Amino acid sequence: MKKTAKYEKIYQDLKDKILTGAYSDGKLPPVSELTGLYGASLLTVNNAVKLLVEDGIVSRSGGRSGTRINQPGLRRMNLSKSNSNTWDGNADIFRRRKVTLRYLTDSSAHFLPKQMPSIIREFESRYPWIRIEQDFTDDTDFLKNSGHDIIQASHSAMLPLISRRRLLDLTLFFEKFGSNNNFFREKCTIPLMLSLPILCYADDTIDSLPSSWQDLLNLNQQLKKENKCSAIQLGFFSLLHFFIGDIRENLFDKKKEKDFILLIEILRDYYKWQMPWNNFAPSEISSAVMSNKISILAAYSNSTLISKSNNLKTAPLPYCNSYLAETVRIGINADCRHIPEAWLWVNFLRSEAVQKKLIETSYGIPYHEKVFNSDFKDKFPSLYQTVLPLLDKINEPRISDAAREMIYHVVYPLLEKCFANDFSAQSCIKSLREAINEMLILDSLDNNF
């Protein structure tokens, strides 16, 4: 059996490190440093580097730039480029390096659930040494205890992990490899998709779109007289945000009192509207929309509604200073042992190919700028024109899902009592403020905001 020369061993070790992302800055260490690292002569190290040059993996120049890596690890794995990721001739690495990534998805934030098995298979075919194991959970505390490498959930559900520094700070990755995180700046998580609140309407049933929330209330009164229907799919917190702005900052702002009252009047109007789908149940509202039973709907944009209801068009919600976006986000566990592979998987989900699948299944809006400005624009032109001017006004909630759920147990009973005229709108606002504030304080203590 032929003995492997030392320079060949160094060559193979350097090659393995390059292809698995060890030198992500795009350069090999100086030869003088490599000689000390491997305990080898300058000639031996030079022979090893020469083989890398012959492979086309690195390039040498006569200047100070040193030995440049042509395809440095993760930079080579830019999944938006179709001519990359071939990994031809590196089967030896695949056989020796086996990585399993555990991927956890919050059941309330499924991202392409029907397509995910095929997406995983495609990823594993590109990167044969990586295996993806996907798990789902209904446990609201799963973030606190999860040992998974990659975690996907709504943004507010991720807040406890972010605050406890359980997610990897991705700043260095963004700096080195670029970020398509154009809509939201969060150093620990990356958006996969977003939903924006908008008006959906049948233009043959209304004369003009409302330009304010009071106009919407007046329009509802007119629709009732004509035996036409209106519905709202937005939760209390989304509406509260539109009316008063950031809830934590403006909850007790006396200047927002009139807006608060108008919010309650609009909710009362829908609550009193005797239609089977006006119970704030999203599935029933969606069915009514697709059956063309609703003339105007305020809802988070789901292009399923737009594509399946032939006469439905879209418009921005009236009189909003900012729009509270709902996003599905993904993060890497700070304790993950295979960060380069986890970054690969995260970026695969952000890639153009997967974002196109998102569009094809009509689920939300792709956050990826390249896809958003091409495929989404072509497939849903009216929705694109609606959403485009809203992008600069996007906010995300800073209230965790757990706190929001606790508050809902208090909010809706209070609203129902107000709707039943058991007490006034002012009394309702006072009670709502006290209940919400108490939960926000607990949320702040729990998550160290």
Image (cartoon, rainbow, N blue to C red):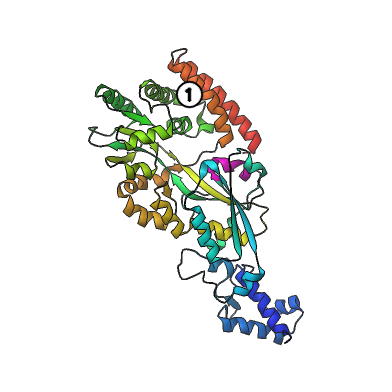
Which segment did they paint magenta?
153-163
Label 1 Cα neighbours within 10 Å, binned few <14 / some 14-19 / many ≥20 = few
Residue 445 is left or right of residue 321, and the answer is right
Q: Looking at the picture, does residue 4 appear above or below residue 409?
A: below
Location of the C terminus (image quadrant): top right
| Quadrant of the rendering where the N terminus is positioned | bottom right
Task: Please tell me which residue is depicted at 63% across the width and 30% down the height of the picture.
Answer: 442
Occupied quadrant, residue 260 = top left
Which percent across, then down, holds residue 123?
53, 61
Identify whether 397 is placed above or below 41.
above
Asked where in the image residue 393 lies, by quadrant, the reply is: top left
Residue located at (56% from left, 36% from top): 401
Kind of residue sitting beneath label 1: Lys
What count of labels does the image hold? 1
Residue depicted at 61% across the width and 65% down the height? 129
In this view, the residue in front, 171 or 144, is: 144
For this view, does 296 lie left or right of residue 412?
left
Horizontal and vertical percent for residue 148?
64, 50
Q: Magenta: predominant secondary structure element?
A: helix
Q: Which image quarter: residue 220?
A: top left
Q: Residue furthest right?
A: 39
How far from the left and from the top, in percent, is residue 385? 32, 47
Query: Taking 230 as reference, is 11 left or right?
Result: right
Q: Which residue is mark 1?
A: 254
Residue 278 seen by the camera: yes
> Percent x, y for residue 447?
63, 38
